Image (cartoon, coloured by chain):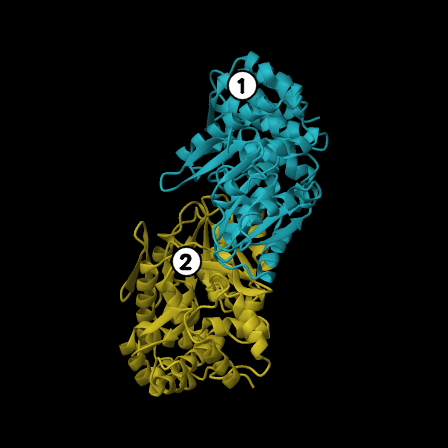
Chain colours: A cyan, B yellow
Amino acid sequence: MDGVDVVNVDLGDRSYPIYVGTGLLDDGDALRAHVAGSTALVVTNETIAGLGYLDRTVKALTAKDSKLRVETVVLPDGEEHKNLEVLNAVYTRALETRLDRGTTFVALGGGVIGDMTGYAAASYQRGVKFVQIPTTVMAMVDSSVGGKTGVNHALGKNMIGAFYQPECVLIDIDSLKTLPDREFASGIAEVVKYGLIRDGPFFEWLEANVDKLLARDTQAIAYAVERSCVNKAEVVAADEREGGVRATLNLGHTFGHAIETGLGYGEWLHGEAVSAGMCMAADMSLRLGWIDASLKERTIALLNKCKTPIDVPEKMTVQMFMDLMAVDKKAANGKLRLILLKGELGECVFTGDFDQSKLQETLDAYVK
Amino acid sequence: MDGVDVVNVDLGDRSYPIYVGTGLLDDGDALRAHVAGSTALVVTNETIAGLGYLDRTVKALTAKDSKLRVETVVLPDGEEHKNLEVLNAVYTRALETRLDRGTTFVALGGGVIGDMTGYAAASYQRGVKFVQIPTTVMAMVDSSVGGKTGVNHALGKNMIGAFYQPECVLIDIDSLKTLPDREFASGIAEVVKYGLIRDGPFFEWLEANVDKLLARDTQAIAYAVERSCVNKAEVVAADEREGGVRATLNLGHTFGHAIETGLGYGEWLHGEAVSAGMCMAADMSLRLGWIDASLKERTIALLNKCKTPIDVPEKMTVQMFMDLMAVDKKAANGKLRLILLKGELGECVFTGDFDQSKLQETLDAYVK
């Protein structure tokens, strides 16, 4: 595998590789090395299958090993289908094709497919192995790494799930060529997050290179994806179960999840909601006196360049935010906790210890 | 807690207690000590709630700690409701009442409630703590101990789930007073299993004391429950994830699951299906020449005394058995593996290495 970079996710008692490169999807060796047993189930959605990626993956898996039996299941595309009912279709397919505990599930798609396949793997026969092949920026830089899996509930996003790590993550930058601009930009918003929470120089690199990224410069994309993976891997290694620092990866997510749930899943893309949420977090951080005005401005300016939302949708009310944020997973003993910027660029805190009136001010400022 | 016996389940990196005694349900101290956080969700079914156990549990939890907020959810009773749809009602209740990651779920009921509540705990917000309060023999001696949690799929029993251990198991023998005879007997069949697979002297004790048990002698029941828990705890400690010896706890279960799924969940009780399945396993073991005829006869005689089935239901065909057993979780690389008796009373093997024609002979002999 020439030109492939490997980022290792080290969890102490085990570790797994993230491969970042081009041409990886058709390279059966990389994938096959992480598929145990004599069967595999490739899970994808209609869009990805329609673009030919499913056939290519099955071919890559079976080309050099005709004894491997590869089954497939194609789910509807979109966050609104990330629920128990659609998840059940994965179990059904696995049972219909008599896949036993030794099988490997392969997630081929964006964050929704990765989260659902990972959770299906965590729960099918109480756990089988799985591999991530993310095909969106969002999945490459965030959701495919770190083992958070699950589905949504009508009353809250990602409320049903498990921590369950993949055998490997296979990132083929080429697969972004078919990604629509809106989804591409949504993923870049999540990349910006790493700059804000822990990697100031990367934020500055993004300020200088965002145009190249949006113009789909392969080298720029590969750099941004890999640097995001390194950041994510470091955080996950330090705190797999989100007892502390891992929560900082959710900058903007508490506001963002409220928007996603409030609008109905699928209306806004995850990264779009997070983009607006990060602006709100920056705004609130400034009101608390924790950052300079310039950092809020730079955050908004960069996200605006990404063409992701910097305001909240008109449908959202203050009450909706308060109700939906109250069920956030980061709440503790009924108290809301948020990730907020504090200090220089690249510094943040995860805390429930803030002046509640500033949260109210931010909501009042953002809600139409 | 006078007169309470404690069996410890030692899993190496952690352990938890099984309390066996009388009057435990109303003793808030024992329960409260294992409920972390400021909220709890008691999950039970209509039957158990109707018998007053839900109110008593809530009272025991709150009597000495008015700051603990206790929510409840009452599910329909029966194996046919052990599915994703009913499970979702638990998540909904938890979200409606805004229970956060620090909450504790309490399973109050039989095996279905225990398995579903445990799995809800394993997956709610990617994992919260839970406590088992089994109210049936089956749940006390088997399902509440060892961390196997999950729900059924239309195509197979317990096909969706997780290994997830409780904080403690609280067994109040008094709660069996309201258990119907049919369910009581079903649980005793599972007790017989421990004698067959690893505890010959216990099997002999059961042969001598089965009448006392069925007459609901409290001391006899307490002894049988505790000895079963000791056996289960030892097996689980040796092999939490069922890599080997734990599979032997499934004597009769591969046949039994096929019966349960084939009839439709809820038609036969789990222990009833296992009872018939153990007779089939003994029959097959004899045909293989692995046990003496007397052991098969003693097995059937003891289960017959328990008044649990020693034959398969008329609806079952050989083809149904073959199809349903093919998706058994213990299958590996498409090969069926069974727990069979081999040697003296109390000895068994878990193997896929047997003369297939003997399986066929057993099915032919048992299917009408």
Q: Residue at x 63, y 46 (%)?
A: A44
Q: Which mark is residue A203?
A: 1
Q: Amino acid at mark 2?
A: Gly
Parent chain of label 2: B
Using the rendered view, name the quadrant where residue B268 is placed. Answer: bottom right
Q: Residue at x 35, y 52 (%)?
A: B33
Question: Could you confirm whether marks 2 and 1 are on the same chain?
Answer: no
- The crowd level at tag 1 (other Cα within 10 Å; few <14, some 14-19, many 20+) is many
Parent chain of label 1: A
Quarter of the image containing the C terminus of chain B? bottom right
Q: Which label sits in the foreground, 2 or 1?
A: 1
Q: Secondary structure at mark 2?
A: loop
Tell me the residue that label 2 is attached to. B147
**Left or right relative to B33: residue A179:** right
Using the rendered view, name the quadrant where residue A224 is placed. Answer: top right
- Residue A186 position, x and y percent, is 64, 29
- Residue A35 position, x and y percent, is 50, 48
Q: Residue at x 59, y 59 (%)?
A: B86
| Cα–Cα span, label 2 and label 1 | 45 Å
Q: Which residue is at the front of the view, A84 or A21?
A: A21
- Residue A313 position, x and y percent, is 70, 30
Depicted B336 relative to depicted B307: above or below: above
Q: Which residue is at the front of the view, A42 or A59?
A: A59
Quarter of the image containing the N terminus of chain B? bottom left
Using the rendered view, name the quadrant where residue A242 is placed. Answer: top left
